[in-house]
Image: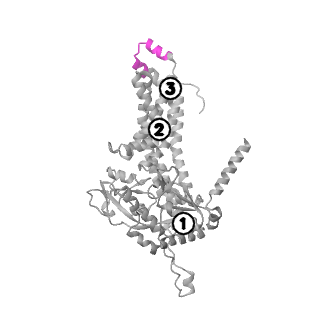
Amino acid sequence: MRVLFLLIVAALLLSSQRARAGDLAEVKARGELVWGGDLQGGEPFVFEDEKTPGKIRGFEVEIADAIARRLGVRAKFAQNDWSNLVPGLERGDFDMALNGLEDTPDRRQRILLSVPYFVYGETLTLRKGDERRSLSELSGRKVGTLNQTVAHDLLKQQPVEIVLYEGQQEPYFDLQHGRTDAVLLDHIIADRYGCVLKSLHCVPEDVARGVYVIGFQKGHTALQHAVDDALRAMIADGELRRILEGWKLWDARQDELAVRSAPPPPPAPVASAVAAAQPTREAAPAPRHFDGRQLHLFLEGALITIVLSVVSFAIAMPLGLLLAIGRLYFGPLVRTLCAAYIELFRGTPLLLQLYVLYFGLAPVIRLSPMTAAILGLGLNYAAYEAEVQRGALLAIPRGQTEAAEALGLSHAQTLRHVLLPQAFRTALPAVTNDFVALLKDSSLVSVLTVVELTKRMTIAAVDLRDWMIPGLACAGLYFAMSFPLSRLSRRLELKLQHDSHPRPA
């Protein structure tokens, strides 16, 4: 057993070492250029071929292949969540990040960036009939976008209510159904997911312009320069244009690529040694720390988590009890329906149920994010509570029911006055455990744009470039919410035992 454990550890260490990113010499020695991206980004960036399982396509796939070919190696894709591309690159999970990475001052402080391979424009999308054409006209309105984007940074400077999404299609879906008032995203996304919808229209003028670049670890300058040379050569000989035209991405904006990718001019002669010793530099953004403002935001997220959990459980408990009673004391039809409900909600992922409630039912009923989150959690946990309550009711000796009948109590009276109080005492530990589990599962509702505690932690971690302190703060708040519940449950359990000499907790 010990030998098997050592072999597993050794295999993990070796696979970790093989996955480490390297500079140009290591890439060539390895014979492959590992690039990170997110398949969830979808068409036209990088996505799975629907006809050939396991094969990936996209204009960035073709750019990566062309760069690797010019370096004399082969390209290898590494799946990574888009929001964690930069942290993954810093960890050394891949050699370069290539997936709609925007050139920003903050990223230039963290990683090395290549010359641009695509010029994008920020596109404002509105519902048909909305005559507004600028962000300044959307004061106080809900505007959707993606986190960690230039669009998000632009919206932070406006008096609008920002709604953050995980995917590219969801913002336009919500705009289409009236949950938001506008969407601001890159034109490459807007053209495919927003402007094509009949109920929406895109403002033709760009709100701003930017470029997509490739990211590298600090210190990997040789690889950065080699990729820069490859991209410049692709621009010069027309290969990059052919790739973009193949995906119908070439437009007038791309005429800027040659200028934006040109090598920097040599430094001008300086007037004095003092001037040479003090070159001008771009001001670095001030370092950010976990401060009182962040703590306040975390507390707001914790409050939303508590409200979500309490209201959801207030739905789950009575509904679960009704399902348990239906399975035990009603006829075959009701039993079958209750069993079907329980198996359906226990047998499918909670995340899928949230998607169906919020997005799938939108054409029929437009639930707000908070309402969909509460309903999703409540309906899901009702299935688990039904089984807890059913087990507690079955644990009561049959003699209790017979004694109640002998006293002349009806079935309803027996259930209410004899069985349910005893079942509640038996089920209490499991019910408390389920509530704590629901408290943690509430983190899944961030996919519905609800910024609860865990989502607040991920936003802060990216903004602060630190996962430790926000993670510890998040864990501390979850513990502060769940631990008192377990102690309260224990006290109530001891009280219900009617034991004059209760055992210590």
Percent position of residue 214, x then y: 52, 65
Q: What's under tag 1, amino acid-wise?
A: Ile
Badge 2 element: loop
Whether 326 is among the magenta residues is: no
Looking at the image, can residue 110 be seen?
no
Asked where in the image residue 341 lies, by quadrant, the reply is top left
Q: Is residue 44 above or below residue 389?
A: below
Q: Is residue 396 above or below residue 240?
A: above
Looking at the image, can residue 168 be seen?
yes
- In the image, farthest residue toward the right: 3
Q: Report crowding for label 1: few under 14, some 14 to 19, many 20 or more residues within 10 A (C-alpha).
A: many
Is there a contact, CB below 8 Å, between mark 2 and mark 1?
A: no
Q: Magenta residues, as a range?
A: 399-416
For image coordinates 49% across by 66% down, the residue present is 213
Q: From mark 2 to mark 3, how far is it between C-alphas?
A: 24 Å
> Which residue occupies the foreground of this view, 416 or 434?
434
Is there a contact, CB below 8 Å, between mark 2 and mark 3?
A: no
The disc at residue 348 is: 2
Q: Which residue is mark 1?
A: 67
Q: From mark 1 to mark 3, how far is it between C-alphas?
A: 64 Å
Percent position of residue 65, x then y: 53, 62
